[in-house]
Image (spheres, grey):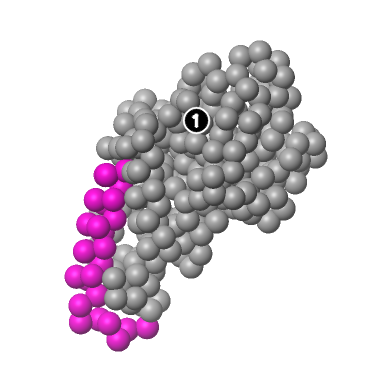
């Protein structure tokens, strides 16, 4: 498998990859830069963690496009996407937008027209309840943050993340794929060019895991929730490397909540 290194997606979109690789961040955080050729402003999505060298590389990549940062958008509040919010705001003086502390909130369907590109906000709760995606209209590209990753599957980040909301979000993205979205540009990992197939794989995987969790809890329902979650992780995620078990545990807790609600 060829490692993802970022770089141009098309003439309007490029990725500056943050060097923060880990089992959860894959090769690192994707910071997306968008502007039309010749535009004097650019959009930056998810400037990433508080890594001064990375932030300076983002600014240099924006400058190489002959632009300055016109607006900074955040898909969600996790540190690897948004820890640099205050610092990047200082460096750019640009508006900070996203449903996270320190930024001006965004609304479903809100449109940003900056740097000759048009982005539409899509509220996509589930990974976190404040997660949003941004649709590059005309290009069929959806910037997904951690809602859909370039490899593997995402975590439903309990207690903030909720499985019922996440399943609804997959339906929303599936509808966008039916309406012309072809490409998913994630917060980690490579770009995915068959959006409809990826969304279906994600939905199928969630249902498979849910069935496994449902079976695993039989006869153990009276255990304390923390102990039950640990046992389910050991059984259902036995094939997953142990260094991602803490993340799997978050998803298990979200699945247990979903089952408790009678779904």
Work out whether residue 190 or residue 204 is closer to the camera in this orientation and state it.
Answer: 204
Assign a secondary structure to mark 1: loop
In the rendered view, tell whether residue 235 sits above or below residue 120: below
Q: Quadrant of residue 130 in the image?
A: bottom right
Question: Viewed as shown, does residue 230 lie left or right of 13?
Answer: left
Q: Is residue 118 magenta?
A: no
Q: Main secondary structure of the magenta part?
A: helix
Look at mark 1 in the image and give the residue it sits on: 137
Residue 158: image x %, image y %? 46, 65
For residue 135, say whether it is visible: yes
Residue 132: image x %, image y %? 52, 48
Residue drawn at the location 50% of the way across and 45% of the way down: 122
Residue 154: image x %, image y %? 40, 50
In the rendered view, tell whether residue 97 sits above or below residue 36: below
Query: The magenta stretch spans which residues?
Result: 199-224
Work out whether residue 213 or residue 230 is closer to the camera in this orientation and state it.
Answer: 213
Residue drawn at the location 66% of the way across and 13% of the way down: 38
Residue 103: image x %, image y %? 70, 50
Q: Is residue 207 magenta?
A: yes
- Identify the image quadrant of the N terminus: top left
Residue drawn at the location 37% of the way across and 31% of the way down: 180
- Identify the image quadrant of the C terminus: bottom left
Work out whether residue 139 or residue 251 is closer to the camera in this orientation and state it.
Answer: 139
Residue drawn at the location 73% of the way across and 24% of the way down: 68
């Amino acid at each position: 498998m060829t490692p993802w290194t970022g770089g141009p997606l098309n003439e309007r979109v490029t990725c500056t990859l943050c060097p923060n690789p880990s089992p959860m961040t894959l090769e690192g955080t994707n910071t997306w830069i968008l502007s039309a050729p010749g535009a004097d402003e650019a959009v930056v999505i998810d400037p990433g963690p508080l890594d001064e060298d990375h932030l300076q590389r983002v600014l240099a990549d924006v400058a190489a496009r002959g632009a300055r940062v016109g607006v900074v958008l955040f898909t969600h509040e996790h540190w690897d996407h948004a820890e640099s919010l205050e610092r990047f705001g200082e460096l750019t003086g640009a508006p900070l937008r996203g449903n996270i502390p320190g930024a001006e909130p965004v609304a479903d369907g809100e449109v940003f027209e900056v740097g000759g590109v048009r982005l539409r906000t899509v509220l996509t709760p589930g990974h976190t309840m404040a997660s949003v995606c941004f649709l590059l209209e005309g290009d069929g590209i959806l910037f997904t943050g951690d809602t859909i990753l370039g490899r593997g599957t995402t975590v439903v980040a309990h207690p903030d993340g909720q499985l019922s909301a996440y399943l609804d979000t997959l339906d929303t993205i599936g509808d966008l794929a039916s309406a012309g979205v072809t490409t998913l540009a994630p917060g980690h990992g490579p770009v995915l060019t068959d959006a409809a197939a990826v969304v279906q794989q994600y939905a199928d995987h969630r249902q498979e895991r849910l069935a496994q969790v449902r079976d695993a809890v039989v006869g153990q329902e009276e255990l304390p929730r923390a102990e039950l979650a640990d046992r389910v992780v050991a059984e259902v995620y036995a094939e997953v490397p142990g260094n991602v078990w803490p993340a799997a545990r978050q998803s298990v807790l979200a699945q247990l909540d979903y089952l408790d609600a009678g779904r």
